[in-house]
Amino acid sequence: MKNLAQRFLTQDEYRQIEACIHAAEERTAGEIVCLIQSSSYHYPLAGVIGATVMALPLSLVLTGLIGSRFWIGAHNMWVFLGIFGMAFIGLHGWIERSATLKRRFISPKDIEEEVEEAAVTAFFRRGLYRTRDATGVLLFISVFEHKVWILADHGINAKVAPGQWDAIVARLTAGIRQKHAAAAICEAIQAIGKILETHFPIQPGDHDELKNMIMGDET
């Protein structure tokens, strides 16, 4: 079964984005990497919280109905615990299989923190800090969270204001929400490329130092 990163774009769209990165890097000494990851974290508490919140009222209602019908008592604790246990297990599994439902039980703050941490970890784990002139840029997309993050090495951050990255992220996020993910990603890559070209134009003997396109679920 395909994971979220594999379902996010078609193979043709992945190739289209790689071509956009290659074209952008032909005009700059900077290195652009687009990393698409299924999820930044597995959020184990989301399923527990969601299943509990949903199972409690359901169990209370069913305890009253079953207890009254079979003369057990509408407030029998053992009936309630039995129903709650079965409901919790079923609902927990359902929440874990539904990305849309699971996101409802995760706070925006937790999502923001986990995506930022995953992006920073990926930046170093994938070796983006090893470029010759510290000009690596990571375009990080976390599919489950619906979040985008841009990280640039210190050579770039010394010359580029954070607001420029924020504007690209905002446009890309809007494009993804409008179901135009591939086109929005290409537009973001072109914008990143123009910024890099301004401060780090192509140099003689420059070569591609990093893999252009990565799915974060790759080993």
Image (cartoon, helix red, strand yellow):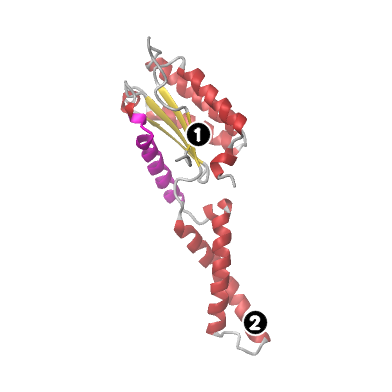
Residue positioned 40% across, 28% down in the render: 137
Q: Earlier in the sequence, mark 2 or mark 1?
A: 2
Q: Taking 205 as reference, is 81 left or right?
A: right
Residue 109 vs residue 89, the one in the foreground:
89
Residue type (three-letter) at the residue carrying disc 1: Ala
Magenta stretch? 108-129
* Mark 2 nearby-residue class (10 Å; few <14, some 14–19, many ≥20): some
**On screen, residue 184 above or below 70:** above
Residue 93 vs residue 159, the one in the foreground:
93
Q: Position of residue 134 (x, y in %)?
A: 32, 24
Res. 66 mark:
2
Dot 1 corresponds to which residue? 170
Residue type (three-letter) at the residue carrying disc 2: Ile
**On screen, residue 106 above or below 167:** below
Asked if residue 110 is among those painted magenta in the image, a careful observer would answer yes
Q: Position of residue 1 (x, y in %)?
A: 59, 47
Residue positioned 66% across, 87% down in the render: 70
> Total of numbered circles in the picture?
2
Residue positioned 53% across, 83% down in the render: 78
Query: Is label 1 in a helix, a strand or a loop?
Result: helix
Asked if residue 140 is among those painted magenta in the image, a careful observer would answer no
Of discs 2 and 1, which sits in the foreground?
A: 2
